[in-house]
Amino acid sequence: MFLAAPACGGGQKQPEPSWRHMKQKKDELAMRKKEFHMIPEEEMKCIWMTAGLISYKLCTHDYRCEDCVFDQAMRNEAAVPGGKTAPQPAHDSGTPSSEPAPQAKAALFYHRNHCWAKVENPDEVRIGIDGILAKLVLQIKTVVLPQEGEVVTQGQCFAHIIQEKHILQLISPLTGAVHLANQRLKKNPHLLAHDPWEEGWLVTIQPENLEHELKTLLFGRKAMAWYQEKEQVVAQAGAAMLSSGGESLGKTLQDGGEQITGFADMLSSEQFDRIIELSSRTEDPSA
């Protein structure tokens, strides 16, 4: 006769888990996972989240990326040398290569006061002036920029360009805290006029309400149409002012006068301010 070995734990055999008990544990685990599941299955992840470039964002446009401002902002990175490659957007906003250099910046967001915004990533936006202002800022003495950590507000003055004859206020296209100020402008402020799109950038900021405020800016084809329109406004207004005040231009260089590097140098302070006002108006002047 064989005797059964005594069970551990006081000699009493532990009951084996029943199927019902195992199923209950499995259901509890499933419920726990469901409670901590952050994204409901019926929600759609943003393609940039799926690609692993952002941590969390849900699609609110039913994957119509051409209607998404956030998608437009993220695609700016594709234009940066060495940046991550993104598929071409459905709303092709490019322009022919025969256009002047300023017209080739359709991937930027534009404020109507002629500062552009480039989204480097959701937490960093680079800001600079466009080509229209660059043509008006010559003989720059200094550039006054906000300090790092200072908060700038969309639609409010955030910097000044001090010229020999004029002072130009710059209007911020977005709201946020200044992360970096372009220190190169201290020693070489003329980068603003010579390379406003690249080396002549002003500041980078950490935006506070990026997606909402980007919707108020101009982008793509609309931005390029607006830009070309404002170039014509500035050119026509400048020509009219100079032709009407030709007698008061003073001595030419041949007569011993000062060298004039651009038509902005030939304008009075009032005329210069008028040009800036016309270039920034929402509706074009009727006359």
Image: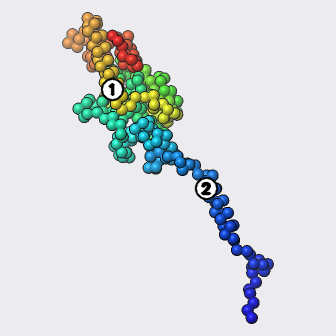
Residue 208 percent location from the top left of the image? 52, 34
Residue 57 percent location from the top left of the image? 51, 44
The quadrant the N terminus occupies is: bottom right
Residue lying farthest to the bottom in this orientation: 1
Mark 2 Cα within 10 Å, few/some/many (few <14, many 20+)?
few
Among numbered discs 1 and 2, the one appearing first in the sequence: 2
Residue sitting at x 75%, y 78%? 13
Quadrant position of residue 10: bottom right
For residue 33, the mark is 2
Q: Which residue is mark 1?
A: 225
Which element carries disc 2, helix, strand or loop?
A: helix
Relative depth, front residue between 219 and 113? 219
Report the side of 90 relative to 1 (left or right). Answer: left
Amino acid on which disc 2 is placed: Lys
Residue 231 percent location from the top left of the image? 31, 21
Cα separation, mark 1 vs mark 2, equals: 52 Å
Viewer can see residue 239: yes
Residue lying farthest to the front in this orientation: 20
Relative depth, front residue between 58 and 185? 58
Residue sitting at x 30%, y 10%? 241
